[in-house]
Amino acid sequence: MSDCKTFKSPGFGECDALRNSVRGMVISDKGTTITLANAKIIGVDSSGWASILAPLIATSTYETGSLVDFKRGYEVNSDAPEMTASNLLFEEQTNNPAPKMIAYGRMSYSEYSAFFRAHGKTFDIALIAENGNPIVSETSTAGTYKGFRGRIFVNKGTIPKTGADLQKECEFRVIFDDAEEWENIVEIESEFTFTDLLDVCPAGLDVEVTTAYATPNVTIKVTSRNATTPYAGVAAPANIQIVEAINDAVAAVATVAQGSKDIGSYEVALTAALNGPVWARISVEATNRTYVSKMFKIVA
Amino acid sequence: MLVGQESINKDFFLGWNYKEFEAYVKSAKLKTGISILELAKKLGIEVPKKEKDELK
């Protein structure tokens, strides 16, 4: 099929002000969608953007997306389309390059290193404007929107930067794989600000294994991200999510000792005789805030 | 469920027999404040007759 579509004059509107700049992106799992009504609101539990970023429902319901703030910089670096002139000098566009962008995350390097595991992976990525408006792609289901399908590449395995270059250290290169999704671009007028969106995102925790796994126990120390404040909220085995394990036996958490929670220390009993690595993550739904850690090796 | 200082994943022990449960709890040195027999009862693990008699 050709690229031909019907066109009729659209007319002029009352206002031609520029829209807001892009301020961030929501990296969501492939297939994540949101309805128009939900895309307009922060929501709670299974509604609004909270349903993707921080569903406060149960320990078995985890977030499917995370927000990256681009306040440290954002630029579009898509290749120009190929323009070909025939031998009779008839010029036209002969390809449709993949849209690309580079963004610099406003986050600590500790947080950035968690995204190393996202390197080369495919996500559905919604952009968020400075005024909080989501920029998404309309799907073929009426009133349902999604992020743009793309792959993320991060700055890993490189020498740390210095001086002014530090601002560009948390680099996200995104290559979008479907140019047609961008033809279905929609900016949704939201009822929230970018700050509202940041505030609903999970608070970060740091976890350190202080006594290595000796079947079946391991001791972990949990603190607020980039701080020494102990975190006392790991109240149940379900708060420790086993994410990846190579064992034939199911790797699971049997008990979490609460005796030293005030100093953020927990003795955890796991399945016996596990072989490492076993990767875990802390995920806690408190009254109005989710707390999550980066993935860590609970069994080395 | 919270028993003593331990927050316990009851599902973890589903289908366990008493002997393997006893061995696990001993190796994990759980600080429940109650005996292994009492803990087994709380978790719905079937206690063999010999141990049941000891409990009496």
Image (cartoon, helix red, strand yellow):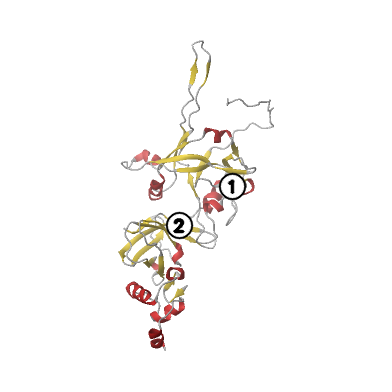
Question: Which residue is drawn at the image coordinates 38% and 84% (left, top)?
Answer: B51
Rendered image: mark on residue A34: 1
Q: Residue furthest top?
A: A88
Callout 1: SS: strand
Q: Residues within 10 Å of mark 2 (few under 14, many from 20)?
A: many
- Crowding at mark 1 (Cα within 10 Å: few <14, some 14-19, many 20+): many
Tell me the kind of residue under disc 2: Val
Residue A225 picture location, percent across and down: 41, 56
Closer to the N terminus: mark 1 or mark 2?
1
Q: Which chain does the numbered disc 1 sit on?
A: A
Q: Residue at x 50, y 58 (%)?
A: A290
Amino acid under label 1?
Ile
Q: CA distance from mark 1 to mark 2?
A: 23 Å
Q: Residue at x 38, y 87 (%)?
A: B54
Res. B34 in view:
no
In this picture, residue A60 sits left or right of residue A280: right
Q: Is residue A119 above or below residue A279?
A: above
**Picture coordinates of residue A31, whole percent (x, y):** 53, 46
Foreground pick, A212 / A92: A92
User: Which of A135 and A63 lies nearest the eye of the viewer?
Assistant: A63
Please state if A263 lies on the left or on the right of A11 as rendered.
left
Please say if A250 is above or below A198.
below
Q: Label 2 marks which chain's residue?
A: A
Residue A293 showing in the rendered view: yes
Helix, strand or loop at mark 2:
strand
Q: Position of residue A176 (x, y in %)?
A: 48, 36
Q: Which mark is residue A234?
A: none
- Residue with the mark numbered 2: A292
